[in-house]
Amino acid sequence: MVPTHPLQPVLDHLHAGRWNAAHDLVQHDGSMLAAWLHGILHLQEGDLEDAENWYDRAGRHFRSRGTLAEELALFEAALASSSPPDVERP
């Protein structure tokens, strides 16, 4: 069985409209991917100031971002190509 990435539940909550649950989970991950997803959550909420802060932490350019749908698609592709922490690729 392939382990899922720890950020997958955050993404699942976001897609289900459970923003508070997603926000609570993403705060416990200090990775760059988590910072990007945190920024996307703030975009979803319309909180552009905090979104920009989290995009900066993720090393991403906030002002040249795509739409929310585009950002989610890019994030999901990045998540799918990353290994869960503590899992070595062969």
Image (tube, rainbow, N blue to C red):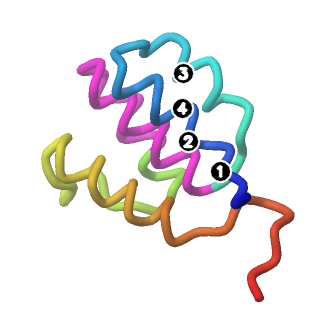
Q: Residue at position x 46%, y 49% from top?
A: 36
Q: Earlier in the sequence, mark 1 or mark 4?
A: 1
Contact, CB < 8 Å: mark 1 with mark 4?
Answer: no
Contact, CB < 8 Å: mark 2 with mark 1?
Answer: yes
In the image, residue 46 above or below residue 76: above
Which image quarter is the C terminus in? bottom right
Q: Cα distance, mark 3 to mark 1? A: 19 Å
In the image, residue 14 above or below residue 38: above
Q: Which residue is mark 3?
A: 23
* Amino acid type assigned to the residue bearing label 1 in the image: Thr
Q: Position of residue 60 (x, y in %)?
A: 40, 61
Q: Residue 78 sits in which quadrant?
A: bottom left
Q: Residue 23 sits in which quadrant?
A: top right
- The nearer-to-camera label among 3 and 2 is 2
Q: Which numbered dot is residue 10? A: 4
* Amino acid type assigned to the residue bearing label 3 in the image: His
Q: Residue at position x 16%, y 54% from top?
A: 66
Q: Residues within 10 Å of mark 1 (few under 14, many from 20)?
A: few
- The nearer-to-camera label among 1 and 4 is 1
- The nearer-to-camera label among 3 and 1 is 1
Q: Residues within 10 Å of mark 4 (few under 14, many from 20)?
A: many
Q: Residue 75 sits in which quadrant?
A: bottom left
Q: Earlier in the sequence, mark 3 or mark 4?
A: 4
- The nearer-to-camera label among 3 and 4 is 4
* Amino acid type assigned to the residue bearing label 4 in the image: Val
Q: Is residue 2 left or right of residue 74?
A: right
Region of the chain picked out in magenta, as a range? 32-54
Q: Which residue is mark 2?
A: 8
Q: Which numbered dot is residue 4? A: 1
